[in-house]
Image (cartoon, rainbow, N blue to C red):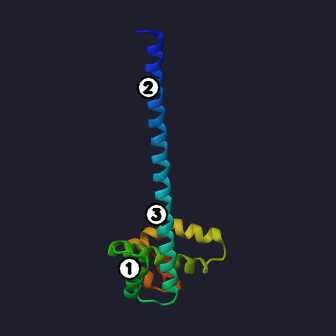
Amino acid sequence: MSKESIRGFFDEIGETVERAVSDSKTAHEESLRDEGREAQRQEDLIAVTELLLDLNTKDGRIYELLRKYFYVNSVDEISEFLLKAKIKKKRKDLSDLFDSREDYLKFLKGNNLNNLLRSNPKLLELPAEKLKKQIENK
């Protein structure tokens, strides 16, 4: 083999590796964009669900609206949006009951509020004042 053919061989390998790295980078960037879009979609649907709750929309109607206008066909996915929106709304209501943000955050962390509400969704039906008292009296 001559030096020229060896050099050509390594140039070809270099170009192949460069193309593979470039393709991999492009696929990774597209994947990140897709993940970002999905995360934004979920946050948007939680916000819409929260707004519908603020308008006193019944859960069944929220299911219908998310299916019809946002093409969410999974009952489990809608249930998760509904739960997250209710938790978010309850957290906002609870935050109004504290004198400072620090006291509120201490309450959240000290009582593991998100997990508590997830594990016992009936607590979400309580007014914020009663919920706070019930948690504090445990």
Check the image and name the residue furthest to the top.
2
In this rendered view, identify the residue nearer to me: 72 or 27.
Answer: 27
Helix, strand or loop at label 3? It is helix
Provide residue 91's location: percent of width, then percent of height: 53, 76
**Amino acid under disc 2:** Ile
Q: Is residue 20 above or below residue 74?
A: above
- The first of marks 1 and 3 along the sequence is 3
Provide residue 36's location: percent of width, then percent of height: 50, 59
The answer to whether marks 2 and 1 mark residues whose Cβ atoms lie closer than 8 Å is: no
Q: Nearer the viewer, mark 3 or mark 2?
A: 2
Which residue appears at 33% of the width and 76% of the height? Answer: 75
* Label number found at residue 38: 3
- Residue 61's image quarter? bottom left
Q: Which residue is mark 1?
A: 67
* Label number found at residue 13: 2
On-image quarter of the C terminus:
bottom left
